[in-house]
């Protein structure tokens, strides 16, 4: 497994892995038309170009055997107001056929190290409160429950809008 930072010239490849990894994992979390709406908003050329030129946002390809099998999106300066000096893990998605291979663990371990290297004190994230596999994954890597919140996004199924904030302190 290798993490490779994405740059503006990677936008076509980044868009493909973002759409593939997200939609293959979460297509059933949306009401009619919602998945298309989300993909258009989150992974359009315009949105990805804005993110890739934003010094606060970083995308990484997760590569395995020279193939892109997932991606990570972080915010270097968290947009949350409940914790200071923290990196926000905004997205981490791996293709379904690669889940359980340890690729996500290796990728997130690299992000944790990168976060330590830039002097941040913690990493925060939000996860759907019914996603027990993801919660267990984060807990194995040392993330702890912080608080609850609600996903405020149209078209997302109501029963899946409950979110858990998790934090990993890096001291």
Image: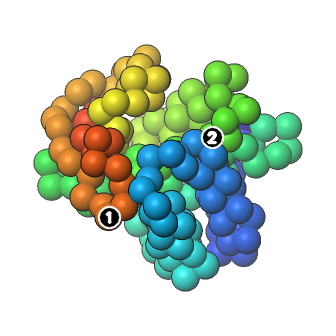
| Image quarter in which the N terminus is found | top right
Q: Count residues near mark 2 (Cα–Cα under 10 Å), then give few for <14, some for 14-19, many for 20+.
A: many
Identify the disc placed on residue 154: 1
Identify the disc placed on residue 82: none
- Residue 136, horizontal then vertical, whole percent: 41, 20
Quarter of image, res 76:
bottom left
CB-based contact (under 8 Å), mark 1 and mark 2: no
In this picture, residue 159 sits left or right of residue 27: left
Quarter of image, res 101:
top right
Which residue position is annotated with label 2? 94
- Residue 132, horizontal then vertical, whole percent: 39, 23
Q: Earlier along the polypeptide chain: callout 1 or callout 2?
A: 2
The image shows residue 18, relative to residue 161, as above or below, that is below
Is there any visible trace of residue 63 in the rendered image?
A: yes
Determine the secondary structure under disc 2. Answer: strand
Residue occupying the point 21% across, 55% down: 80
The image shows residue 18, relative to residue 136, as above or below, that is below
In this picture, residue 159 sits left or right of residue 13: left
- Residue 21, horizontal then vertical, whole percent: 63, 48
Residue occupying the point 53% across, 31% down: 109
Is there any visible trace of residue 71 in the rendered image?
A: no
Determine the secondary structure under disc 1. Answer: loop
Hey, which residue is sitting farthest right in the picture?
Answer: 66
- Residue 108, horizontal then vertical, whole percent: 53, 35
Gap in Å between the C-alphas at discs 1 and 2?
Answer: 24 Å
Q: Count residues near mark 1 (Cα–Cα under 10 Å), then give few for <14, some for 14-19, many for 20+.
A: few
Residue occupying the point 54% across, 49% down: 27
Color style of the picture: rainbow
Residue occupying the point 65% across, 75% down: 8
Hey, which residue is sitting farthest bottom in the picture?
Answer: 46
* Closer-to-camera residue (82/118): 82
């Amino acid at each position: 497994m290798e993490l490779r930072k994405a740059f503006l010239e990677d936008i076509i490849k980044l868009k493909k892995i973002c759409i593939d990894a997200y939609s293959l994992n979460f297509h059933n979390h949306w009401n009619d038309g919602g998945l298309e709406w989300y993909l258009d908003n989150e992974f359009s050329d315009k949105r990805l170009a804005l993110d890739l030129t934003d010094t606060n946002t970083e995308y990484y390809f997760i590569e395995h055997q020279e193939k892109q099998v997932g991606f990570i999106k972080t915010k270097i300066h968290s947009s949350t107001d409940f914790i200071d000096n923290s990196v926000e893990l905004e997205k981490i998605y791996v293709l379904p056929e690669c889940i359980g291979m340890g690729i996500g663990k290796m990728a997130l371990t690299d992000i944790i190290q990168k976060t330590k290297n830039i002097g941040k004190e913690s990493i925060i994230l939000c996860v759907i409160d019914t996603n027990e596999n993801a919660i267990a994954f984060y807990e194995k890597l040392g993330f702890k429950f912080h608080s609850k919140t609600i996903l405020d996004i149209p078209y997302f199924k109501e029963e899946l809008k409950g979110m858990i904030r998790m934090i990993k302190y890096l001291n």
